[in-house]
Image: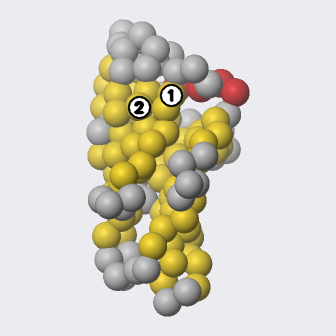
Amino acid sequence: QVQLVESGGGLVQPGGSLRLSCAASGRFIGISAMRWYRQAPGKQRELVAIITVGLSTSYVDSVKGRFTISRDNAKNTVYLQMNSLKPEDTAVYYCNADVNINYNIKLYWGQGTQVTVSL
């Protein structure tokens, strides 16, 4: 069974920083794309950032220049460095990953971690 476990959320003041981590564990051959999503209260879940196995990245416009997605393939872990945080970044942040299990690609989600940006 594959598990994605996020960590690093919390309460931070506007302008502050947080670093989220998402580690994959279990039996699998490898992981291709990894992503961070977020869902604010009353809003739809949105894609925040994506990173491919070749380390290509893409971001939603609202976080460009402030957030950085990275990964450590040896640790099967994806990170989201969030700087210059704004109250509108408040949301539950989820990671997901395309996991290669016996040459079948399956999508797995983490449980989510709360990020609150407030005075």
Q: Residues within 10 Å of mark 1 (few under 14, many from 20)?
A: many
Does residue 47 show up?
A: yes
Q: Residue at x 62, y 25 (%)?
A: 64
106 to 9, vertically: above or below: below
The image quadrant of residue 18 is: top left
Label 2, on which residue? 81
- Cα gap from disc 1 to disc 2, whole angstroms: 5 Å
Q: Amino acid at mark 1?
A: Phe
x then y, percent, for residue 103: 55, 86
Whether the residues at callouts 1 and 2 have beta carbons within 8 Å, the answer is yes
Give the secondary structure at mark 1: strand
Does residue 88 show up?
A: no
Q: Which mark is residue 67?
A: 1
Q: Amino acid at mark 2?
A: Gln
x then y, percent, for residue 32: 54, 65
Q: Residue at x 48, y 68 (%)?
A: 31
x then y, percent, for residue 30: 45, 73
Q: Residue at x 49, y 39 (%)?
A: 69
Extreme-front residue of the structure: 54
Quadrant of the snapshot with the C terminus: top left
x then y, percent, for residue 54: 56, 54
Q: Residues within 10 Å of mark 2 (few under 14, many from 20)?
A: some
Frontmost residue, 58 versus 40? 58
